[in-house]
Image: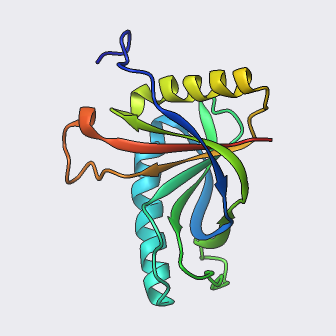
Amino acid sequence: MTEMNPGPAPDIKTAQLKEQPTAVVRETVPMNALRDFFGRAFGAVTGAVQAQHVQLAGPPFALYRGMPTDVVDVEAGFPLAAPFTNAGGEATTVTAGTLPAGQAYEALHIGSYESLQHTYGAIMERMREDGVSPGEAMWEYYLSDPGAEPDPAKWQTLVVWPVA
């Protein structure tokens, strides 16, 4: 697999999503600073959630609002088994959030994060074929830990793109 030959087309499925409580850090981040942001955000959320004794209900995710350019409005965090309570205070960066309910398209991306645009393009094409419009926000569940799996060709990312 290369950028010119991204491999087989992803298997795109439709899903009916249920609302999911989350704890997140939200910032506007330059694309080239996402890795540092994710490390900081996932660590902050983990600490805040543990302090409230709330159980994680899935893998880490990043929710993107709008189409990314050289910067992106992004939330990074975890789905939770129960709602998170905002701790308050000016220094608090971790806040309660939700992944919305509704119809969405999902595809499992296998490979490096740099090739995710191929999966997004395939989902966009499928939405066009089905006559639906993409929502303003989409998210990615990171099913592989790059610290545990150093080979980017084996990384798995579930892309979820709700319908408008």
Q: Front-most of 96 and 94?
A: 96
* As drawn, 51 above or below 73: below
Q: Quadrant of residue 69?
A: top right
Which residue does the image show at 67% across and 66% down from the upper left?
Answer: 98
Residue 122, given in percent of the width and then of the height, sits at: 56, 23
Which residue does the image show at 48% across and 62% down from the upper left?
Answer: 41
Residue 35, given in percent of the width and then of the height, sits at: 41, 46
Q: Front-most of 70 and 78?
A: 78
Q: Is residue 28 left or right of residue 2?
A: right
Q: Is residue 39 left or right of residue 31?
A: left
Q: Is residue 5 left or right of residue 128?
A: left
Residue 37, given in percent of the width and then of the height, sits at: 47, 52
Quadrant where the image shows the N terminus = top left
Quadrant where the image shows the C terminus = top right
Which residue does the image show at 57% across and 66% down from the upper left?
Answer: 24
Q: Looking at this view, name the residue that lies furthest to the top.
A: 4
Q: Quadrant of residue 59?
A: bottom left
Which residue does the image show at 64% across and 25% down from the upper left?
Answer: 126
